[in-house]
Amino acid sequence: MASKGLQDLKQQVEGTAQEAAAGAAAQQVVDQATEAGQKAMDQLAKTTQETIDKTANQASDTFSGIGKKFGLLK
């Protein structure tokens, strides 16, 4: 009878260990996905800022050219 109790306890411990391992693996996947998502957002922000800067520079150059053409700027 005691042997049966020990066997049941052993199975419970093994099951809990397997669940913990599965939980750790799932957490690792979540962590990797989070990191990948953060990298993608960082790249998006960088690219967006570069586009804004380029557009602003082009607009500035265009307005400067128009101003020079009409004698508003030197």
Image (cartoon, rainbow, N blue to C red):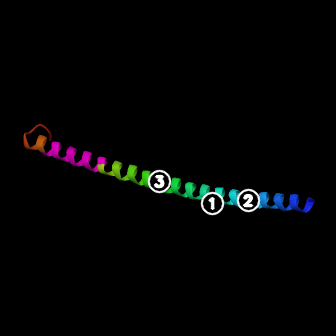
Q: Which residue is mark 3?
A: 37
Q: Residue 16's quadrant in the figure?
A: bottom right
Residue, far right: 2
Identify the residue shown where x is 34% and y is 49%.
48
Q: Is residue 14 left or right of residue 31?
A: right
Secondary structure at numbered mark 1: helix
Identify the residue shown where x is 61% and y is 55%.
27
The earlier-in-sequence mark between 2 and 1 is: 2
Q: Which residue is mark 1?
A: 25
Report the quarter where the N terminus lies: bottom right
Where residue 39 is drawn, which disc sits there? none
Numbered disc in front, either 2 or 1: 2
The percent coordinates of residue 4 (x first, y second) are 87, 61
Magenta stretch: includes residue 74: no
The residue lying toward the viewer, choosing from 11 and 42, is 11
**Tag 1: Cα neighbours inside 10 Å, few (<14), some, or many (≥20)?**
few
Q: Is residue 44 left or right of residue 15?
A: left
Q: Is residue 69 left or right of residue 13?
A: left
Q: Which residue is mark 2?
A: 15
**Tag 2: Cα neighbours inside 10 Å, few (<14), some, or many (≥20)?**
few
Tag 1 near tag 3, CB within 8 Å: no
The span picked out in magenta is 52-65
* Distance Cα–Cα, label 2 vs label 1: 15 Å
| Amino acid at the residue labelled 3 | Gly
State whether residue 8 is above or below residue 62.
below
The earlier-in-sequence mark between 3 and 2 is: 2
The percent coordinates of residue 18 (x first, y second) are 70, 61
The earlier-in-sequence mark between 1 and 3 is: 1
The percent coordinates of residue 74 (x first, y second) are 15, 41
| Amino acid at the residue labelled 2 | Gly
By secondary structure, the bulk of the magenta-drawn segment is best described as helix
Numbered disc in front, either 1 or 3: 1
